[in-house]
Image (tube, helix red, strand yellow):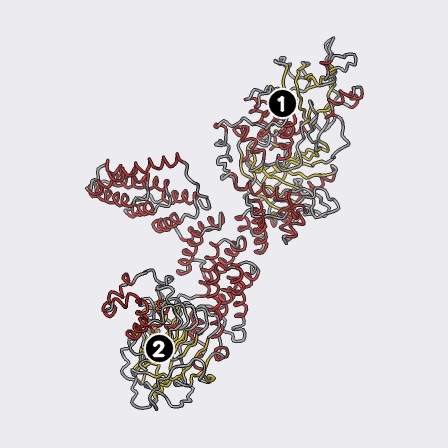
Amino acid sequence: MHGRPRKASKPEEEAASDAKATKLRSLQSQFMANHHDKIYTNEAIELSTKLLEINPEAYTAWNYRKLAVEDRLSRIESDQNLVKSILDEELNVVESALRQNFKSYGAWHHRKWVLSKGHSSIGNELRLLDKFQRLDSRNFHAWNYRRFVVELTNRSEQDELQYTDDMISNNFSNYSAWHNRSVLLSSLLARNADGFIPNKKIPEEYDLIHNAIFTDPDDQSGWFYHLWLLDQTVNVETPLLTSSWPSHGSSIILSGPGYLNGSSSNFTTFCSESDSFPLILYFDQAVGGVSSSTVTIDAELKGNEDLVWEPVSNKNSQISCVWVARLKYFSSKPCEYKVKVRLGNSPGIVSSRGCTFSAPYEFVFTAHVHEIVKDSQEGTVSWTDGFDIWDAQSKDLNPLVILDQLNAEMDVKWREAAILEEVKCFRLLSDSKIGKLSLARLLMAYEAMISDAAVKGIHYEEILQLYNDLMALDSSHYQYYKDAHSLVFLHKVTSSTESLSRHLFRYRDVNNLVCLRLNNLSLSRIASVEKLLFIQMLDLSHNELHSTEGLEAMQLLSCLNLSHNRIRSFSALDSLRHLKQLRVLDVSHNHIGKHSVDTTRYLCASPLSNSEWIQDDVGRQKPGMGTKYWDAYFVLRDLNLKQFNIAGNIIAGDDEFNSFVLQVVPTLVWLDGQKLGS
Amino acid sequence: MSDLPPYPPLDPCNYDLIVVGTGVSESVLAAAASSSGSSVLHLDPNPFYGSHFASLSLPDLTSFLHSNSVSPPPPLPPPPSPPGHDLLSVDLVSRSLYSSVEISSFESEILEEHSRRFNVDLCGPRVVFCADESINLMLKSGSNNYVEFKSIDASFVGDSSGELRSVPDSRAAIFKDKSLTLLEKNQLMKFFKLVQQHLAESDDTTLKISEEDMETPFVDFLAKMRLPPKIKSIILYAIAMLDYDQDNIETYRGLLKTKEGLDQLALYIKSMGRFSNALGALIYPIYGQGELPQAFCRRAAVKGSIYVLRMPITAVLLDKASELTLDCCRLETGGYKGVRLASGQEIFSQKLILDPCITVGLESMSSLTDQQKETLQVFVPKAMSSKDKVARAICIIKGSVKTDVSNALIIYPPKSLFPEQLTAIRVLQLGSGLAVCPADMHVLYLSTLCDNDDQGKEALLSAMSTLIGLPVPENLQSDSVVENDTAEAKPTVLWRALYVQELVKGEFGGTISSAPSPDGNLNYNEIVESAVKLYEQLKGREELFKEKTSPENTAEEENDVGEDIED
């Protein structure tokens, strides 16, 4: 069924297909007339049978038949034999349609519908399926339908697992069979069926998939199953708290807007204009249900009983990895508060897979409220000097809480052993692409798992080299490997206090902001943000970034340098909308304007199809301006920038754009290095 | 044979071609010649079809081997030539193809009871590859209508430990294999892919194996591909089906070039996928190999060829050499004219093809003229071009050599059983599903090439002893029960035949040609190839079964395996 070349049709074939089309058209119009007039006579039904025999893709005809069946059943309710014969006839029609095209969605769906009417001859269904699956063992329609029938017949999952065994040993190049296997195993493992213990079953599955991958490293069906197994080994279903800001045991300094004179404090200083500061929770997977009832704050701060937690996510959904709430404080006089945050005591935080955050966890931090000494100065932020060596508390870089929770949640021993075994195995295959890629992934997984400080971090150089090799070896997937390389690099940088502090500085000119400088590293994506929540100033200039995705979690960020990257549109900056503290943004020397829409992330090409646009009053009031720069508008309207640098982009430079920016960002003081109004 | 019923005289007594013997080669030629419109008389001295390729009951097999292994008594004095006969009659003798025939029966009663339910091959072990030329020829000639095939379920490689490991001959088999390491699986599949790429019809020379490599010994090429010895051995002996030890430079016999090795692999690979209802590369005809020559004979009969069994020929008839005749139209002086049948009747033909067993006594050659000797050149003993032999064995066993497998091929590569083992030993087990034996038994065929009888038999006995238990005398049986319980019970042998067969090549001799004996190979390719060549020589470049294209005979056949012939 696969890999058969298409042949050009001969004239006589074309003539035949023309004749068929004519016949089909006349059938179709007669049928539509019947359908329209709700005629369910035997002749009319027979007509739809004929139509479906020729064209099983005629959805309307299938729907018509459903109506016809309902109609007939309503009239002969009592007679079981008649009911059976009506349903039997439907099954026959479906079968002959499937003979014509066994990938017809409509036909398979109709069959499901008939069976759900309570037709009893379900035993036949498996026989029919065997026939279709022999014809094409990879037909996913048949596999889908198989799952449906199995559920109806209560056939055991073990039997079905055996069936996938048989199919795979006939031909292991079968995505559907491997997929079904993962579905069945997930269910068997989840309900702890007899003999299905993860620490025994998962290694057995690794052995099976090795045979496929080693026999034919180019066959991709095996890769996916291996990825699934790796996922089963590494990840736990229950969501865990990865990090927070402020972090456990840390101290922070809070102050109003302005300048703290020569503060040599090595604490993170947070200047607020609204007498509040953010509390950030970062989970290992997207969760919902973070609220004042699931997260409790024991604080000497008053007025925070009904905190509003908001998901920080580019999609307007109510689940996210990052949640933020704003804690209020009184800035009137210097003082000190202790804050204790507890979560997991009551259920409610639930992952998208439906697993509840269950391990109770708490952390404590101290907030010092300082007074402002001087008024703030409106100088420009220079990215070239004014940096001091970072000397602050290492609490911000505390080993993250996740490992303790992991130990509590899962039996790490067998998982670590399984990953090590995989690493050993794939080292043998490291001359092939999939071998290198798998090895890189496995070593990453291993790094994430080990807690022994002595060996932690030693694999990063090897992983980076593997991705370098892959980039050279397989240029058609260069960007994928490049992104993975950036991710690994950032993991490496953030893996220890020592390595991270090499990139950390204090920015003397503005309240000794904590500045992370990751410039000139050819990064193509952002990662490890969960370890960087305390960063207030970030230099990502001279990289190869396409998007700012991930930065939305860095709620403390007030200065961001993205100059000399590869950002092509404002929509690629979308995540910045969440950064309420952002005052200084440099996106100069990118490619903004090259594509008005980042087509990798948005399907809609026009603002007219964007519901946000239609709801936005400002946008509608200024249609001329908005239509041209609508994507810039969506990003900039949420930002309170004082300093904005966009020179060196295609979009920038003309007066029209500049006046647009001034209109949308009224807080702006500096644009492209020029003080406004001077 | 003297009490043969008298035959009515044959009519007509003039043919284009007389074929004596119904072996595969002779039958293909008879079918091809009759299909192209020649008149053919096909004779066989035996009461059955197939000659040395026949499948027989145990008693028939026994008597055939015995009667063809000792020099037969001198033929009866031929009936005197009619007076005034202007033809010279040269008496024919038969020579024995078999030696060291050793037949023993251990359970006579059981065998007696089923004696007629065996169809045992004389030329075993032998199978057909799905992509074999013999299959093509059957489809082309229409003789596939008379044979049904079934798959050989599995093939194994064995060694002296008695363990049988399945041959990983396909992607699925490599995937399932339990004995290869992951890396070996990877290397083997990589090699198969390389071969497939090489065989694929593509102009991309980067995917092809270089010309230079093609001329190197295959075993060196495999080493260059860094295949470990275990895999090399599987490829050489269990897939390419080689006989001689490729690692032993001293014997240097049968050393295969990469080009030839790839051809062998290509045959195997093409066979794997040819018929959708065949499990693997190998198939076997139901009722035994004897069905194959018989199918061609039937085809020949349909096309008008005349068949007479139980009819030996006693002499060939030549033109008398007469120097006196100066007549220009008698140029073919000393040429072949016909044969004399055992019935005494003389039959004439243009051409004659003879069973490899038939020859002329040396003493009768001495009195002939040069021209007559020229006519009879196929009988002149050659300077012993090859004195190769093949040792064969047949065992009827109770049980199977491998649990759950009935029809299987087993290969013992050179040196796998004992250090001096020079050639591969092939073993074929067949079960009742192929209608060759009763239900609870199997027929086991073994063969290996050898230089002398003792060497060959020793090798076969060694293979037998690792596969099957020899019958235990009754008084010892109770003692041995304890040890037998621990090991997997080996099947027991009920009947056994051991014999060594001479390998005789077929030969074209102008008017009189001889057909080859069964060869030492697993399939018929060389035999069919030589038949095709002989036919071309006889007919002058004419293609076999050329006109055979009538649609009802093409491929939609009832034959079990032939349902779906692609390409």
Q: B58 or B456: which is nearer to us?
A: B456
Image mark 2: chain: A
Looking at this view, name the residue that lies furthest to the top.
B83
Q: Residue A393: x percent and y percent? A: 44, 84
The Cα atoms of the two marked residues, 2 and 1, are separated by 110 Å
Q: Say if B393 sits above or below B330 in the image.
A: below
Tag count: 2
Image mark 1: chain: B
Q: Say if A647 sits above or below A118 in the image.
A: below
What residue is disc 1 on? B47
**Considering the numbered disc 2 on the image, is that residue within a helix, a strand or a loop?**
strand
Mark 1, other Cα within 10 Å: few <14 / some 14–19 / many ≥20: few
Answer whether residue A241 is visible to the viewer in this image: no
Q: Residue at x 54, y 42 (%)?
A: B272
Mark 2, other Cα within 10 Å: few <14 / some 14–19 / many ≥20: many
**Considering the numbered disc 1 on the image, is that residue within a helix, a strand or a loop?**
loop
Q: Residue A337: x percent and y percent? A: 34, 86
User: Contact (CB < 8 A) between labels 2 and 1?
Assistant: no
Q: Amino acid at mark 1?
A: Pro
- In terms of image quadrants, where is residue A551? bottom left
Q: A168 or A647: which is nearer to us?
A: A647
Q: Say if B542 sits above or below B421 in the image.
A: above
What residue is disc 2 on? A671
Q: A304 or B40: which is nearer to us?
A: B40
Q: Residue B308: x percent and y percent? A: 61, 19
Q: Residue at x 53, y 27 (%)?
A: B548
Quarter of the image with the N terminus of chain B is top right
